[in-house]
Image (tube, helix red, strand yellow):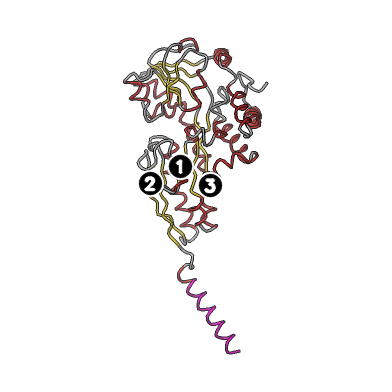
């Protein structure tokens, strides 16, 4: 009886201490988050200006028991563009924006939109379709798992066009010219007579200015942010389609150190980041073109007939890629068909039915 009273007293004392201190598990977690791109681009500024403060806000609203101490490393200061996946996997940084566009060998399935040009200009259709594929095709999730990462939220970019130092009104006009194409986007000018040169948003302006190449395949919100019209004043809106380009992820070991309530906040805010970023891209895309036009850009918008002619100039890039993936025991054909069917079910009219 005496022992029971003593045990009860101990339990009550511990409970009282926990109530006063907020619990023995209360903790401040240090998280370094990085991106290869600078915050002038929406997917980075949205992580900085929405994701981080929103996580902090929700943790505070939950009682402030757990906190995040952020170290923000944007613009390649810690993880260079194309090196974010490895940096997060190795624990050099804890979280960051992984540009899957530049991780094609490690994350091939996440490049399905870039391997399937002339899709949909609807940003929401693209991000929703890729999210759907991540849930339906286990190999999609595996691309994050095998790099020891948890996917939080994705980024789809507004439809791609072409900015050049020379006028482009048809596919014939790019013959003989050097065009910067990020990663798999080089396939969009196969058989056209143009020469694809590796490049990215961080280098386009200076490389075009110095003549490394004469134009770049890119999307309007980024082109406007980078003021590309100053060096490439001819804007041809080819409408190659909106593209899934990457997402925010976090090292799984760091993730496992979080209590469930913190994980829940990160997951919820990550999903909202995807939606808010898609809306921000959509809202700013048309204005970006107007801004570039006001800055001196001459704009040409290709008709559906000319887009169809361009698409038919290309080899069957998606199905060739699907065959290569299938040979590597990855679900290539399933991914391409799933992507195209996802776009069709969301109202897209394709100028080339790659899978038919």
Q: Is residue 161 magenta?
A: no
210 sits left or right of 60 in the view: left
Cβ–Cβ under 8 Å for marks 3 and 1: no
Residue beneath the point at 41% across and 12% down: 167
124 sits left or right of 56 in the view: right
Q: Nearer the viewer, mark 2 or mark 3?
A: 3
As measured in the structure, the alpha-carbon distance from the residue carrying label 3 to the one carrying label 1 is 14 Å
Report the span colored magenta. Answer: 1-18
As measured in the structure, the alpha-carbon distance from the residue carrying label 2 to the one carrying label 3 is 19 Å
Q: What main secondary structure does the magenta stretch of the protein show?
A: helix
Toward the bottom, the furthest residue is 2
Cβ–Cβ under 8 Å for marks 1 and 2: no
Query: Could you tell me which secondary element the residue under label 3 belongs to?
Result: strand
Residue beneath the point at 42% across and 23% down: 290
Which of the image's four quarters has the N terminus? bottom right
Q: Say whether disc 1 or disc 2 marks the residue closer to the N-terminus.
A: 2
Q: Say whether disc 3 or disc 1 marks the residue closer to the N-terminus.
A: 1
Residue 342 x/y as whole percent = 64, 31
Query: In the displayed structure, would residue 16 be above or below residue 68?
Result: below
| Label 2 neighbour load within 10 Å: few <14, some 14-19, many 20+ | some
Reading the image, the residue beneath label 2 is 72
Residue 283 x/y as whole percent = 48, 32
Mark linked to residue 86: 1
């Amino acid at each position: 009886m005496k022992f029971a009273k003593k045990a009860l007293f101990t339990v009550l004392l511990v409970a009282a201490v926990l109530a006063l201190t907020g619990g023995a598990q209360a903790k401040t977690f240090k998280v370094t988050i990085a991106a290869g791109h600078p915050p002038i681009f929406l997917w980075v500024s949205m992580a900085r200006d929405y994701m981080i403060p929103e996580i902090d806000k929700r943790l505070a609203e939950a009682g402030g028991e757990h906190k995040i101490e952020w170290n923000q490393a944007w613009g390649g200061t810690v993880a260079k563009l194309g090196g974010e996946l490895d940096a997060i996997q190795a624990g050099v940084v804890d979280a960051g924006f992984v540009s899957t566009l530049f991780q094609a060998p490690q994350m091939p399935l996440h490049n399905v939109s870039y391997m399937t040009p002339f899709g949909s200009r609807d940003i929401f259709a693209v991000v929703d379709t890729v999210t759907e594929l991540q849930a339906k095709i286990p190999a999609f999730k595996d691309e994050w798992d095998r790099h020891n990462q948890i996917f939080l939220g994705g980024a789809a970019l507004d439809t791609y066009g072409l900015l050049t130092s020379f006028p482009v009104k048809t596919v014939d006009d790019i013959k003989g010219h050097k065009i910067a194409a990020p990663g798999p986007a080089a396939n969009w000018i196969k058989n056209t007579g143009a020469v694809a040169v590796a490049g990215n948003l961080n280098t386009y302006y200076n490389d075009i200015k110095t003549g490394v190449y004469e134009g770049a395949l890119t999307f309007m919100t980024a082109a406007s942010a980078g003021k590309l019209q100053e060096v490439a004043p001819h804007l041809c809106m080819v409408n190659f389609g909106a593209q899934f380009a990457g997402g925010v992820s976090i090292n799984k070991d760091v993730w496992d150190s979080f209590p469930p309530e913190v994980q829940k906040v990160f997951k919820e805010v990550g999903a909202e980041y995807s939606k808010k970023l898609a809306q921000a891209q959509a809202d700013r895309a048309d204005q970006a073109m107007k801004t570039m036009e006001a800055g001196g850009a001459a704009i040409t918008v290709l008709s559906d007939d000319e887009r169809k002619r361009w698409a038919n100039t290309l080899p069957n890039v998606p199905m060739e890629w699907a065959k290569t993936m299938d040979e590597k025991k990855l679900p290539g054909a399933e991914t391409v068909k799933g992507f195209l069917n996802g776009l069709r079910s969301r109202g897209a009219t394709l100028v080339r039915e790659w899978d038919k």
